[in-house]
Amino acid sequence: MKFKKINVLVSVIILSILLAACSSKNNTNEKGAEASASPSATQKEQKEYKNELNIALTAQPPTLDSAVTVSAVALDTAGNIFEQLFTLNADYKPVPVLAESVEISQDGLTYTFPLRKGVKFHNGKEMTSEDVVASMNRWLAISSRAKVLLVNAKFEAIDTYTVKLTVEKPSSDVLILISSQAQFPSIMPKEIIDTAPADGVTEYIGTGPYKFQEWKQDQYIHLVKFQDYQSSQEKASGFYGRKDAPTENLYFHFVTDHSTRIAGVKTGKYDIADSIPIENYDELAADKNLELLSFPGGALTAFLNTSEGLLSDVKYRQAILAALNNEEIMLASFAKPELYSLAPGYLGANQVQWANDAGAEYYNQADPEKAKKLLKEAGYNGEEITLLTTKDYAEMYAATLVIQEQLRQIGMNVKVVNYDFPTFLETKNDRSKWDLFVASTGYQLTPPQLLAVNPDWAGLNDDKVKASLAAIRGAATPEDAKKEWEQLQGYLYEIGSSTVIGHYNGIVAVNKSIEDFELFEAPVVWNAKIAK
């Protein structure tokens, strides 16, 4: 990459994520992040490989339009179809994919991206600046993160193979936002963008190693190898580098029943299975044909409705935080204490740039008497509280049931409503229909990317939060940025808008015969293959 200027904060952010990544690798099983060692060249020549790879997902994606969803199953699947201007390598460094490089102006307000030439979309059209401008400006307009963090930013075409991004004010995380997987900006043909329905693209045409073939509702998504894909020759690293697509067909099966998903991976029906329930950990670990990969998954987080209903009164939110016994909730959700930890930080303990304990006085209080007192002061009179959840994610459902019981113990009238995952996400957006929900939230590279501070996620619309995010992004030094985030984290607990319940490890089960599969923030399958 070519840079004229980069704020020093970017370098420190990347360093902190590097340390987190190293810890992540240390938390995998002893056989490492790859499912198996690659065989020798001679062995490879002698082997025959299957023409399909079967991946079992715990939920059906709500869409494959990456700009409008935070669903991990959607983004992980869509990453095989779509590509970005920049992405993250294994060192969490932004690196070019569809762009050749970037040049940043001295004032930090202009980013110029020369584009790769000859890149083909799945429909045979060559990618040019008009496609990139249409795609990126749509992302700026509809991505909940981009709308908040890149206000008034704009992409323009300089010529057929060059685009320019202009931002309102300099900040340290522009390339990180463009490179991140969270709501990543897919590059699509301009004509697809121009005709996209308001609720998201339904014609999935990208430049990635696989192209969309079929979505069989409630069963699977089928992707096929894109024969004209022009792979980078760089070594595969994170989401960057070589993408060979050695397997002709990828099937992403929606297997919401956990026992069915476990049985399927044990029998070989599925080659990869995500979101393994902890209660099945020992059973699968003992299977000689399988390997379990464990990695820091994120924070199990409770979000409280600050904008509508009873909980719009901060005293009720404080009462709920006082009642929560996080140890009970995490034990019910993850069963094995070695696979979770308790800490109030919204980011990982090893993300040294951002980790802190601000708000600890409001965290894991397990004080029902204090909670009852706060309810009495607030004038609680038996009003019903609705907890929204989905059984598609076992840990979210288990946590919700424990919270229901803990709130009943302090005298609250609590009901649980359960939906499949896409309906859960849709219902979450109607804040008249819930008071609290629990979500498994993956770690982000910087605090402004967290769902806990995103007004579109759970309705938090707070001027102090907005000012703090601006201060973090514009901080002159990493120390100043960390101080701002520490104050903001404490404020989130003070107003009770959300609370981390605990930090968890994610578990993926893979067939030991699989080759060139990697786990980096998500299962990376575009180089994976399995012998017949």
Image (cartoon, rainbow, N blue to C red):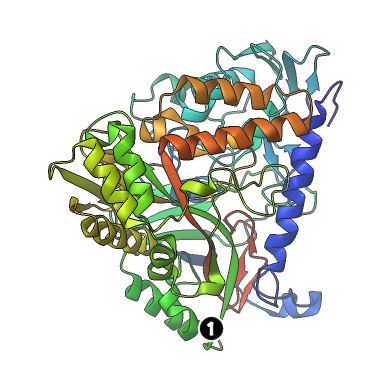
Measured from the top left, where is residue 433 in percent x and y? 20, 38
**Residue 288 visible here:** yes
| Quadrant holding the N terminus | top right
The local secondary structure at tag 1 comes to: helix
Give the residue pinned by disc 1. Answer: 285
Q: What residue lies at 45% left-to-right and 26% top-to-bottom?
A: 192
Q: How crowded is mark 1: few (under 14 residues within 10 Å), some or many (20 or more)?
A: some
Vertical order, 292 against 180 (above or below): below
Q: Quadrant of the C terminus?
A: bottom right
* Amino acid type indicated by mark 1: Ala
Q: Which residue is drawn at 67% across and 78% down?
A: 47
Q: Is residue 201 left or right of residue 107?
A: left
Q: In which quarter of the image is residue 170?
A: top right
Q: In which quarter of the image is residue 14?
A: top right
Q: Which of 503 and 177 is in front in this view?
A: 503
Question: Measured along the vertical axis of the image, is residue 147 above or below residue 526?
Answer: above
What percent of the width, then of the height, locates residue 455? 42, 28
Instruction: Give the x, y percent position of residue 235.
Output: 79, 53
Whether 528 is drawn above or below 453: the answer is below
- Place of residue 292 in the rendered image (x, y in percent of width and height, measured from the top left): 57, 75
